[in-house]
Image (spheres, rainbow, N blue to C red):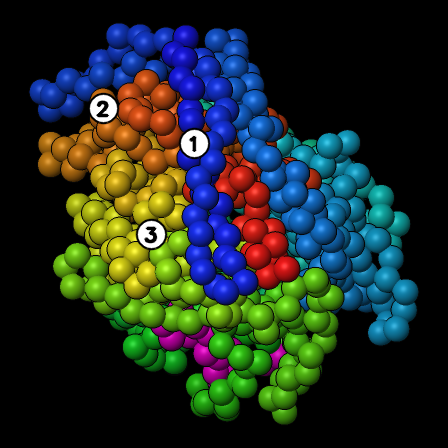
Amino acid sequence: MKNTLFALSLLTLMVACKKETKEENSKTSIALNYPETKKVDTVDTYFGTEVKDPYRWLEDDRSEETENWVATQNKTTFGYLENIPFRKDLKDRLSDLWNYEKVGSPFKEGEYTYFYKNDGLQNQYVLYRFKNEGDEPEVFLDPNTFSTDGTTSLGGLNFSKNGKIAAYSISEGGSDWRKIIVKDVETKEIIEDTLIDVKFSGISWKGNEGFYYSSYDKPEGSELSAKTDQHKVYYHKLGTKQKEDALIFGGTPEEKHRYIGASVTEDDKYLIISASISTSGNKLFIKDLTKPNSKLVTILDHTDSDTYVIENVGSTLYLVTNLNAPNKKIVSVDASNPSPENWKDFIPETENVLSPNTGGGYFFTSYMVDAVSKVLQYDYDGKLVREVELPGVGSAYGFGSKKEEKELYYSFTNYKTPSSIYKYNIAEGTSGLYRKPKIDFNPDNYESKQVFYNSKNGTKVPMIITHKKGIELNGKNPTILYGYGGFNISLTPNFSIANAVWMEQGGIYAVPNLRGGGEYGKKWHIAGTKTQKQNVFDDFIAAAEYLIENKYTSKDYLAIRGGSNGGLLVGATMTQRPDLMKVALPAVGVLDMLRYHTFTAGAGWAYDYGTAEDNKEMFEYLKGYSPVHNVKEGVQYPATLVTTGDHDDRVVPAHSFKFAAELQDKQSGVNPTLIRIETNAGHGAGTPVSKTIEQYADIFGFTLYNMGYEVLPEKVTNKVKG
């Protein structure tokens, strides 16, 4: 057992009435006894290079030994967290602020209008419905009743064409493996056997007869970590057994793909199938459902683009694509001859990234202008009707409805403004506030501004910094720098209850739009992939340096945070520049870059990462930044709280287990290195509110405590003001 007593210097800032600053140092300590993690002589050889993997045994998520390791690590971690003096204060404030009614945008299905609502602290959102405006809404589906502890959540939901039957998926313990349940809308009764072993699937109805869904054959070994790489599309006809479901696509070696999705056009005329081997790029096929025994017709036979059908009018298809258009455009083509040489530009590419939707007989094109929303409305002739006037600078979501609707709903938010819902008159182009949340948080007390900074190679990168108005730029503001930087995913301004609590404490929340994301289109994404992945880490490091140079914070008050691919970002940054931050918070991270592709659907991430088996150059590049392989003896790493879930079958928890073991073995100095493992939890989706609040209380508590606070910063400030 490695015994370490951490004496943390805790700094309390007191400002006298004459505004003279006095610093008082006090000391407290929390005893830490790290569980000893055994090492096993496991060695892999890549292109003649031997690589040790002493903690390989932690990859076995079914072993009693791993289970015991999880239990002892959690005992150590929670023993530490429970001794943080303001942990309960944070949890109480998070609970108080979280406790307000949250309502989603309404949508119509059949005779009913549906909407999701959470009364405040419910673990899961409840689905309500009403027939006529003014009717008292009734509960249609309450996921809080799915399990006693709130860990079974609602996944996808789709209705038959006439709206009389609903099919929905559920996730148990946060797993990506789902079950599909079919319910009669009027009686609310389950009308047939539950479909099981469904994964990475939508639910798309063909009329009122049945629906398409996707899954893999159940893997041998652990369903939480075993590799899954041949996705298949099935058609389930109502009233039949799942074993009778027709295999539509994906069953042959020629049709083998890692991810396959099926969708039916709104008019029930076409089945669209998208097939991918990785998280970027897809083939595309179409089948005419009005003709019995019609064949699949190829639209795209390669994966050089991300392309999908957004709409059709009769046989005219409208496709969104980034083929030869990195920022995306909409093209039209006839379904009888849909290959790219016949495409015609409908809404051409612009300098900003396009994310379109359709509603009420119009196209709504949402553009990201430096990560901020701009929305245009077009008719079906491709003519610009108007720019939609948004409530402010931030992110607008929605703008979708069925063709016959006269109104639609959209939501608007930014880093300091809770999401509000607006009703939009499609013909007139006018918006009205439909619902604004009543929350104990005043956005007027905060400011959010966008800055641009230069990365290591001179690339200009945007970052939005949000905090209380009037903070002093003295280098002593507790700051969370949050990033992702991968998979063409864009970080746009969004309100977070947890971040609001952080900012209430005088904290700064900063989000840079790193390369690898999609904020500036495909080129921006590609610039952060494979042998250019270091660009992402350099962008993040430069963001930290900007915050420090401009006195927002200093290395003693800076925490870096990210999840999944963002967990990799944190792991790589803290091992490359451990001197730059006080706290590191990698969540559900991809941290073993030599073996990530051997678990579940991990091989699908190779488009972004490459694999250690590709070639010697790729192996050496991955090994050069892989967090698990770059923890070094004798280095003082920042105070680190690794977080993961024991049922995470997206990024298996072994990544986090091995990284934590390496840190605990090699860490030099007084900073704690802990791992918090949520039991009966997955990658994050569907996490109960109660667990989410506890997680944030621990994350923020750990962060502030290791920045030197004995009491919450806001309490210090209030005491000074008093």
Mark 2 Cα-neighbour bin, 10 Å: few <14, some 14–19, many ≥20: few
Residue tagged by mark 1?
8
The image quadrant of residue 252 is top left
Q: Nearer the viewer, residue 24 or 512?
A: 24
Examine the rendering and report whether any part of residue 135 can be seen: yes
Indicate the secondary structure of the residue bearing disc 2: loop
Query: Is 372 covered by the magenta stretch?
Result: yes
The image quadrant of residue 198 is top right
Q: Amino acid at mark 2?
A: Gly
Q: Which mark is residue 554?
A: 3
* Residue lying at 85% horizontally and 44% vertically, measured from the top left: 189
Residue range in magenta is: 360-379
Indicate the secondary structure of the residue bearing disc 1: strand
Residue tagged by mark 2?
634
User: Counting residues from the N terminus, which is met first, the one under dot 2 or under dot 3?
Assistant: 3
Task: Give percent across and percent down for residue 32.
Answer: 47, 19
* Residue lying at 78% horizontally and 66% vertically, measured from the top left: 113
Q: Nearer the viewer, residue 113 or 220?
A: 113
Q: Nearer the viewer, mark 3 or mark 1?
A: 1
Residues under numbered marks 2 and 3 in contact, where contact means CB atoms less than 8 Å apart: no
CA separation in Å, label 3 and label 1: 18 Å
Indicate the secondary structure of the residue bearing disc 3: loop
CA separation in Å, label 1 and label 2: 19 Å
Q: Nearer the viewer, mark 2 or mark 3?
A: 3
